[in-house]
Amino acid sequence: MNLNLTGKTALVCGSTQGIGKATALELAKLGANVTLIARNESVLRQTVELLDTSAGQLHRYIVADFADNQNVKDAIENYLRLCPDVHILINNTGGPAGGQAIDAESEQFVKAFQMHLVNYQNITQAVVPSMKRAGFGRIVNIISTSVKQPIAGLGVSNTIRAAVASWSKTLSAELGPFAITCNNVLPGYTKTARLDAVLQMRSDASGKSLEEVTESLQNAIPIRRFSEAEEVAAAVAFLCSPAAGSINGINLPVDGGRTESL
Protein backbone atom coordinates (compact mmCIF):
# COMPACT_ATOMS: atom_id res chain seq x y z
CA MET A 1 0.00 0.00 0.00
CA ASN A 2 1.43 3.35 -1.05
CA LEU A 3 1.15 5.79 1.85
CA ASN A 4 4.30 7.69 0.95
CA LEU A 5 3.89 11.49 0.92
CA THR A 6 7.54 12.35 0.37
CA GLY A 7 7.83 15.42 -1.81
CA LYS A 8 4.24 16.48 -1.10
CA THR A 9 3.37 19.68 0.75
CA ALA A 10 0.39 19.82 3.11
CA LEU A 11 -1.41 22.81 4.60
CA VAL A 12 -3.07 21.90 7.89
CA CYS A 13 -5.51 24.38 9.43
CA GLY A 14 -6.09 24.57 13.16
CA SER A 15 -2.96 22.53 13.66
CA THR A 16 -1.62 23.50 17.09
CA GLN A 17 -3.99 21.34 19.12
CA GLY A 18 -6.39 18.43 19.00
CA ILE A 19 -7.15 16.62 15.76
CA GLY A 20 -5.42 19.25 13.61
CA LYS A 21 -2.14 18.86 15.49
CA ALA A 22 -2.39 15.06 15.42
CA THR A 23 -3.01 15.21 11.66
CA ALA A 24 0.04 17.41 11.08
CA LEU A 25 2.19 14.97 13.03
CA GLU A 26 0.83 12.00 11.06
CA LEU A 27 1.36 13.63 7.65
CA ALA A 28 4.94 14.47 8.58
CA LYS A 29 5.52 10.83 9.56
CA LEU A 30 4.45 9.85 6.03
CA GLY A 31 7.08 12.18 4.58
CA ALA A 32 5.09 15.32 3.78
CA ASN A 33 6.35 18.86 4.13
CA VAL A 34 3.82 20.35 6.53
CA THR A 35 2.73 23.96 6.86
CA LEU A 36 0.76 24.68 10.01
CA ILE A 37 -1.95 27.35 10.11
CA ALA A 38 -3.18 28.84 13.40
CA ARG A 39 -3.31 32.20 15.17
CA ASN A 40 -0.82 31.71 18.04
CA GLU A 41 2.71 32.10 16.70
CA SER A 42 4.49 30.89 19.82
CA VAL A 43 2.50 27.65 19.84
CA LEU A 44 3.03 27.28 16.09
CA ARG A 45 6.79 27.45 16.63
CA GLN A 46 6.60 24.79 19.34
CA THR A 47 4.47 22.52 17.17
CA VAL A 48 6.75 22.79 14.14
CA GLU A 49 9.58 21.47 16.29
CA LEU A 50 7.58 18.28 16.95
CA LEU A 51 7.18 17.36 13.28
CA ASP A 52 9.15 14.45 11.82
CA THR A 53 12.03 15.44 9.54
CA SER A 54 13.53 12.00 8.87
CA ALA A 55 12.76 12.27 5.13
CA GLY A 56 14.41 15.68 4.88
CA GLN A 57 11.12 17.58 5.13
CA LEU A 58 10.93 21.34 5.43
CA HIS A 59 8.13 22.43 7.74
CA ARG A 60 6.69 25.94 8.01
CA TYR A 61 3.82 27.81 9.63
CA ILE A 62 1.35 30.56 8.79
CA VAL A 63 -0.10 32.91 11.40
CA ALA A 64 -3.75 33.56 10.64
CA ASP A 65 -6.92 34.20 12.63
CA PHE A 66 -9.96 32.34 11.28
CA ALA A 67 -12.23 34.95 12.87
CA ASP A 68 -11.00 37.35 10.15
CA ASN A 69 -11.63 36.12 6.58
CA GLN A 70 -9.47 38.78 4.98
CA ASN A 71 -6.59 38.04 7.32
CA VAL A 72 -6.69 34.36 6.38
CA LYS A 73 -6.97 35.14 2.67
CA ASP A 74 -4.03 37.55 2.77
CA ALA A 75 -1.88 35.16 4.80
CA ILE A 76 -2.44 32.30 2.34
CA GLU A 77 -1.74 34.49 -0.68
CA ASN A 78 1.51 35.74 0.90
CA TYR A 79 2.56 32.17 1.65
CA LEU A 80 1.85 30.97 -1.90
CA ARG A 81 4.07 33.70 -3.35
CA LEU A 82 6.99 32.06 -1.55
CA CYS A 83 5.83 28.43 -1.62
CA PRO A 84 3.54 27.96 -4.63
CA ASP A 85 3.23 24.15 -4.57
CA VAL A 86 0.53 22.65 -2.37
CA HIS A 87 -0.70 19.08 -2.78
CA ILE A 88 -2.76 18.50 0.38
CA LEU A 89 -5.19 20.75 2.23
CA ILE A 90 -6.71 19.92 5.60
CA ASN A 91 -9.60 22.26 6.39
CA ASN A 92 -10.19 22.37 10.12
CA THR A 93 -11.15 24.93 12.74
CA GLY A 94 -12.78 25.04 16.16
CA GLY A 95 -16.50 24.42 16.43
CA PRO A 96 -19.12 27.06 17.29
CA ALA A 97 -20.34 27.48 20.86
CA GLY A 98 -22.98 25.06 22.07
CA GLY A 99 -26.67 25.71 22.57
CA GLN A 100 -30.00 24.96 20.95
CA ALA A 101 -30.58 26.18 17.41
CA ILE A 102 -33.82 27.94 18.36
CA ASP A 103 -31.99 30.07 20.93
CA ALA A 104 -29.12 31.13 18.65
CA GLU A 105 -28.86 34.68 17.37
CA SER A 106 -28.62 35.06 13.59
CA GLU A 107 -25.16 36.57 14.04
CA GLN A 108 -23.94 33.26 15.48
CA PHE A 109 -24.85 31.48 12.25
CA VAL A 110 -23.19 34.18 10.16
CA LYS A 111 -19.99 34.08 12.24
CA ALA A 112 -19.82 30.29 12.08
CA PHE A 113 -20.43 30.31 8.31
CA GLN A 114 -17.60 32.80 7.85
CA MET A 115 -15.17 30.93 10.11
CA HIS A 116 -15.80 27.60 8.46
CA LEU A 117 -17.18 27.63 4.94
CA VAL A 118 -15.96 31.05 3.79
CA ASN A 119 -12.40 30.43 5.01
CA TYR A 120 -12.38 26.95 3.51
CA GLN A 121 -13.60 28.29 0.19
CA ASN A 122 -10.95 31.02 0.10
CA ILE A 123 -8.09 28.67 1.00
CA THR A 124 -9.25 25.98 -1.40
CA GLN A 125 -9.55 28.43 -4.29
CA ALA A 126 -6.02 29.62 -3.57
CA VAL A 127 -4.37 26.16 -3.58
CA VAL A 128 -6.32 24.25 -6.22
CA PRO A 129 -4.33 25.72 -9.15
CA SER A 130 -1.11 24.18 -7.79
CA MET A 131 -2.87 20.83 -7.31
CA LYS A 132 -4.01 20.95 -10.93
CA ARG A 133 -0.43 21.67 -12.07
CA ALA A 134 0.85 18.72 -10.07
CA GLY A 135 -1.88 16.35 -11.21
CA PHE A 136 -2.35 15.39 -7.56
CA GLY A 137 -4.57 16.91 -4.91
CA ARG A 138 -6.12 15.88 -1.63
CA ILE A 139 -8.63 18.05 0.23
CA VAL A 140 -9.89 16.68 3.54
CA ASN A 141 -12.36 18.58 5.69
CA ILE A 142 -12.51 17.65 9.36
CA ILE A 143 -16.16 18.17 10.26
CA SER A 144 -18.35 16.13 12.65
CA THR A 145 -20.66 13.13 12.79
CA SER A 146 -23.46 15.71 13.10
CA VAL A 147 -23.39 15.72 9.28
CA LYS A 148 -25.12 12.33 9.47
CA GLN A 149 -26.86 12.62 12.84
CA PRO A 150 -27.33 16.08 14.47
CA ILE A 151 -25.97 16.32 18.00
CA ALA A 152 -28.28 17.69 20.68
CA GLY A 153 -27.16 21.02 22.10
CA LEU A 154 -24.97 21.95 19.12
CA GLY A 155 -27.53 23.72 16.93
CA VAL A 156 -25.28 26.19 15.15
CA SER A 157 -22.52 23.63 14.69
CA ASN A 158 -24.93 21.05 13.23
CA THR A 159 -26.15 23.59 10.69
CA ILE A 160 -22.75 24.83 9.54
CA ARG A 161 -21.14 21.39 9.43
CA ALA A 162 -23.89 20.20 7.08
CA ALA A 163 -23.25 23.17 4.81
CA VAL A 164 -19.54 22.32 4.63
CA ALA A 165 -20.34 18.69 3.81
CA SER A 166 -22.58 19.72 0.91
CA TRP A 167 -19.94 22.15 -0.35
CA SER A 168 -17.33 19.40 -0.21
CA LYS A 169 -19.49 16.92 -2.11
CA THR A 170 -20.00 19.52 -4.83
CA LEU A 171 -16.25 20.12 -5.07
CA SER A 172 -15.53 16.40 -5.31
CA ALA A 173 -17.40 16.27 -8.64
CA GLU A 174 -15.88 19.49 -9.95
CA LEU A 175 -12.27 18.63 -9.07
CA GLY A 176 -12.23 14.87 -9.60
CA PRO A 177 -11.29 15.16 -13.30
CA PHE A 178 -8.04 16.85 -12.23
CA ALA A 179 -6.99 13.98 -9.91
CA ILE A 180 -8.02 16.07 -6.90
CA THR A 181 -10.16 14.31 -4.31
CA CYS A 182 -12.31 16.01 -1.70
CA ASN A 183 -13.50 14.07 1.34
CA ASN A 184 -14.80 14.67 4.84
CA VAL A 185 -13.71 12.98 8.03
CA LEU A 186 -16.39 13.04 10.71
CA PRO A 187 -15.00 12.71 14.24
CA GLY A 188 -17.32 11.54 16.96
CA TYR A 189 -16.56 12.16 20.62
CA THR A 190 -12.79 12.60 20.59
CA LYS A 191 -10.46 13.40 23.47
CA THR A 192 -9.82 17.10 22.80
CA ALA A 193 -10.39 20.43 24.53
CA ARG A 194 -13.59 20.71 22.49
CA LEU A 195 -14.94 17.52 24.07
CA ASP A 196 -14.04 18.80 27.53
CA ALA A 197 -16.17 21.88 26.85
CA VAL A 198 -19.11 19.79 25.59
CA LEU A 199 -18.95 17.53 28.65
CA GLN A 200 -18.91 20.54 30.98
CA MET A 201 -21.82 22.13 29.09
CA ARG A 202 -23.90 18.97 29.46
CA SER A 203 -22.97 18.63 33.10
CA ASP A 204 -24.04 22.20 33.82
CA ALA A 205 -27.30 21.83 31.88
CA SER A 206 -28.29 18.51 33.45
CA GLY A 207 -27.00 18.96 36.98
CA LYS A 208 -25.14 15.67 36.65
CA SER A 209 -21.48 15.26 37.50
CA LEU A 210 -18.83 15.17 34.78
CA GLU A 211 -18.26 11.52 35.58
CA GLU A 212 -21.94 10.70 35.07
CA VAL A 213 -22.11 12.60 31.79
CA THR A 214 -18.91 10.97 30.56
CA GLU A 215 -20.08 7.47 31.44
CA SER A 216 -23.44 8.03 29.74
CA LEU A 217 -21.84 9.19 26.49
CA GLN A 218 -19.28 6.40 26.46
CA ASN A 219 -21.99 3.80 27.02
CA ALA A 220 -23.68 5.02 23.82
CA ILE A 221 -20.53 4.17 21.83
CA PRO A 222 -20.14 0.53 20.75
CA ILE A 223 -16.42 0.49 21.60
CA ARG A 224 -17.29 2.05 24.99
CA ARG A 225 -14.70 4.81 24.87
CA PHE A 226 -13.95 8.16 23.28
CA SER A 227 -11.68 8.22 20.23
CA GLU A 228 -8.10 9.43 20.42
CA ALA A 229 -7.12 12.39 18.23
CA GLU A 230 -4.44 10.18 16.68
CA GLU A 231 -7.06 7.70 15.50
CA VAL A 232 -8.92 10.42 13.62
CA ALA A 233 -5.63 11.72 12.23
CA ALA A 234 -4.79 8.28 10.85
CA ALA A 235 -8.00 8.28 8.81
CA VAL A 236 -7.26 11.77 7.51
CA ALA A 237 -3.72 10.82 6.55
CA PHE A 238 -4.88 7.72 4.65
CA LEU A 239 -7.28 9.82 2.57
CA CYS A 240 -4.33 12.06 1.69
CA SER A 241 -2.20 9.17 0.46
CA PRO A 242 -1.72 7.87 -3.10
CA ALA A 243 -3.50 4.68 -1.99
CA ALA A 244 -6.76 6.61 -1.56
CA GLY A 245 -6.88 8.01 -5.07
CA SER A 246 -10.28 6.48 -5.89
CA ILE A 247 -11.96 7.58 -2.66
CA ASN A 248 -13.76 10.81 -3.43
CA GLY A 249 -16.78 12.66 -2.13
CA ILE A 250 -17.33 10.60 1.02
CA ASN A 251 -18.20 11.31 4.66
CA LEU A 252 -16.09 9.00 6.84
CA PRO A 253 -17.17 8.75 10.49
CA VAL A 254 -14.45 7.99 13.03
CA ASP A 255 -16.63 7.55 16.07
CA GLY A 256 -16.37 4.03 17.41
CA GLY A 257 -19.64 3.11 15.70
CA ARG A 258 -21.81 5.64 17.57
CA THR A 259 -23.51 7.08 14.48
CA GLU A 260 -26.61 4.99 13.85
CA SER A 261 -27.10 5.81 10.16
CA LEU A 262 -25.45 3.84 7.38
Image (spheres, grey):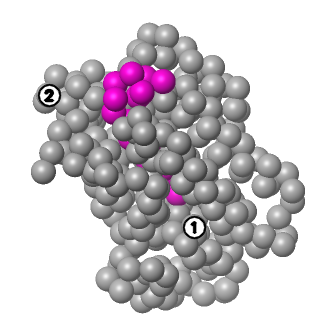
Q: Nearer the viewer, residue 25 or 234?
A: 234
Q: State which region is magenta.
A: 129-143
Asked which secondary structure carries label 1, the reply is: helix
Q: Residue furthest top?
A: 82
- Quick check: can you spot residue 196? no
Answer left or right for 259 relative to 97: left
Q: Is residue 25 above or below residue 163?
A: above
Where is residue 181, by image quadrant?
Answer: top left
- Element at badge 2? loop
Where residue 8 sits: x, y (%)?
28, 29
Tell me the amino acid under the disc marked 2: Ala
Q: Is residue 137 visible?
A: yes
Position of residue 217 measured from the top left corner of the image (x, y, whole percent): 48, 83
Q: Position of residue 39 (x, y in %)?
A: 56, 32
Q: Residues within 10 Å of mark 1 (few under 14, many from 20)?
A: many
Left of 157 or right of it: where is 184? left
Circles 2 and 1, Cβ within 8 Å, touching? The answer is no
Q: Which residue is mark 2?
A: 55
**Image quarter in which the C terminus is found:** bottom left
Task: Residue lying at the far front in this picture: please name it.
Answer: 177
Q: Locate residue 178 relative to residue 122 in the image: left or right.
A: left
User: Image quadrant of residue 109?
Assistant: bottom right
Q: Horizontal and vertical percent for residue 40?
A: 53, 32
Q: Is residue 219 magenta-colored? A: no
Which residue is tagged 1? 147
